[in-house]
Image (tube, helix red, strand yellow):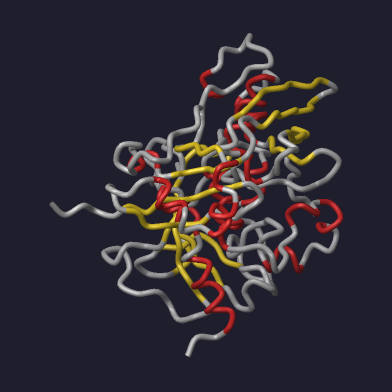
Amino acid sequence: MEKPDERLFEEDLLSAEFLIGAAKGQWGLPAPEVMAEQPPWPNRILWISATPRPDSPDRFYILLDFSGYRSVPPTGTFCDPKTRCMLDLSKRPKGRKDSRFAKVFRTDWPGPPYGVGGSAFYHPYDRVAAQTHAAWPGEQPHLIWTSNHTIVDYLAEFHTLLNSEDYLGTT
Amino acid sequence: MLQKELQLFIHGQELKPTAVVAAPGETLREVLLRIDVFRENQDEFLVFVGECVEALKEPHDVEDGADEHEPVDISLTVEALELGRHRHVHFHRCRHVEVEVNFGGKTKHRKFSPATTIGVVTQWACKKFHLDAAAASDCVLWLCNSSEQPRPDKHLGELVEAPQCSICFDLVKEITPQG
């Protein structure tokens, strides 16, 4: 039987807002030929499209832990959908030096005991980042995750970054 | 002949979008009548198809421009209105949404179709304020006198309710996480 957080997540995947982004090719669930089935709940893999850059993929997969969705923000990072492991740091999207993009997708954070470098996004929508930065609600009140936020808010935020001029590609 | 059904996305004033399935031979009126809100006051609504991107084609030197995006005749069929291509339908009482964007002590105005996304308004504003690509990467729109930041996929019409057919934004640099 589905848990409440899983049921809420599945409902949000059927929302018009999620379907609109999917119809525009901005995000989605992996195709069966890429990944036969999703990992056990509370983990789910999705993809987000990225603006074309030389020798770089047109989309990135993310593996997120949705425990407590929507009351609790998700956490996770880029992954290889075949192995379901964290994406090698050399294959991560790179950003212009000192840009917001580079900060959000930094790979030198978090350290122990919160994870390993690149295992979460340095952004208020990420559970680990939010829980370890007490000042952020005051500094970035508009980006603090609440129970009114959905997976669409999360995907739209990171889609915007991956389609910005600050994204340089993976090489 | 079998006609393939289409998934359409319906937007309206102060409403979350709704997905509906429509057959090519149905009129748009028939499709919209399945939505309770539309049924109540259907004659008061103007209906637009597609998401309007006219502002992105506007020459730099045009001030106080306006979208031409015309409302459609909802007695036409889904097929005739090319909704397979447009996908989005927006019903609203406002013909235009008058947008004011503030940045660096200056203000730009434009009348947009209600079926314009916040993403398009943001791009237009960055262009009007002559921001280079790197600066524009971090710029977002906040509702004036607040820190509320509408998502880029939201339609302007979802944020305003007639007779208030106007909205004010501040163009701000997104905060880079620190600490």
Observer-nearest of A117 and B37: B37
Whole-percent x, y for residue B31 in the image:
41, 52
Q: Residue A48: in sight, yes or no?
A: no
Q: Residue at x 29, y 41 (%)?
A: B79
Q: Check the image and name the residue furthest to the left.
A: B1
**Can you give x and y, in whole percent of width and height, for residue B2 in the image?**
16, 54
Q: In this view, does B48 lie to the left or right of B148?
A: left
Question: Seen in the image, is B89 located left or right of residue B127?
Answer: left
Front position in the image: A28 or A92: A28
Q: Against A39, is B66 above or below?
A: above
What is the count of numbered marks? 0
Residue at 79% in and 27% down: B102
Q: Which residue is drawn at 35% across and 37% down?
A: B81
Give the image location of residue A146, x and y in percent: 73, 65
Residue B87 position, x and y percent, is 40, 44
Q: In which quarter of the image is the C terminus of chain A?
A: top left
Q: Is residue B5 visible?
A: yes
Q: Residue at x 51, y 32 (%)?
A: B52
The answer to whether B82 is drawn above or below residue A74 in the figure is above
In the image, residue A51 above or below residue A12 = above
Q: Is residue B85 left or right of residue A101?
A: left
Q: Which quadrant would residue A121 be assigned to in this image?
A: bottom right
Single out the residue that lies furthest toward the top: B61
Q: Nearer the viewer, residue A108 or B146?
A: B146
